[in-house]
Amino acid sequence: VCTDESSKCRAMASELIKDIFNKLGRDKLATIEDYMTAWMSQTDNKLLLRCGLPVYKIYLETIGRGFNKRLDEIVMRKIREIIKSQEDGNWELIFVSLNVFISIKEGDDNDNDNDIDNEIWNSVISLLLYPHSWVRLAASQAIEYLLKQIENIKDEYQLQTIGYRLIRSLGAPS
């Protein structure tokens, strides 16, 4: 799912993992959830973390959020850390983190919640001008979910920054 160069192979592996999750059902996922928790807790091995995030995304699509609150919290904390630190040139990890974050936001039932996490959103906004174009694309896709809650944004400067960075990113080299 994370190291294959072929998009067809990654898509097929994702489908196989979805099938495994569906066949196991919610009752028998404890071992897989333990593995995902261990992968998300990695500090040294970034490859395990980069592989664990897409597996968690598949888990979200198959099982949904809220089934294992501890795992959900660990993943959100790790995404916050990666996006905030901007992982010193590890664009792949940032890109995967943003994609998982987008999946979490897509699955949120409450689009207009008043709990806007400014720390993570400020980090996503800063990624709008990241050197790698894929990260910029994912950051702009994530911003959509912040703008859906525009009435809850109290800081006009933040809105100006979003507009400026989105326009500026249009002129950035690919």
Image (tube, rainbow, N blue to C red):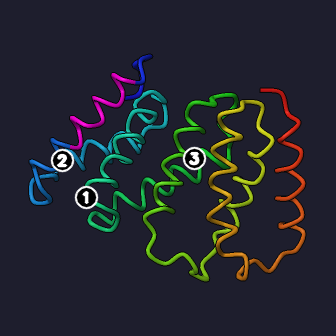
Report helix, strand or loop for mark 3: helix
The residue that appears at 46% across and 69% down in the rendered structure is 108
* 121 horizontally vs 50: left or right: right
Q: Is residue 54 above or below residue 45?
A: below
Gap in angstroms between the C-alphas marked 3 and 1: 20 Å
Label 1 Cα crowd, 10 Å radius (few <14 / some 14-19 / many 20+): some
Sooner in the amino-acid sequence: mark 3 or mark 1: 1
Gap in angstroms between the C-alphas marked 2 and 3: 23 Å
**The disc label shown at residue 63, or none:** 1
Gap in angstroms between the C-alphas marked 2 and 1: 8 Å
Q: Amino acid at mark 1?
A: Ile
The residue that appears at 52% across and 39% down in the rendered structure is 96
- Residue linked to disc 3: 98
Frontmost residue, 161 versus 163 = 163
Q: Amino acid at mark 2?
A: Phe
Tell me the quarter of the picture where residue 63 sits.
bottom left
Dominant secondary-structure state across the stretch colored magenta: helix
Label 2 Cα crowd, 10 Å radius (few <14 / some 14-19 / many 20+): some
The residue stretch that appears in magenta: 8-18
Report helix, strand or loop for mark 2: helix
Q: Amino acid at mark 3?
A: Leu
**The disc label shown at residue 21, or none:** 2
Q: Position of residue 144 (x, y in %)?
A: 65, 61
Q: Is residue 105 above or below residue 53?
A: below
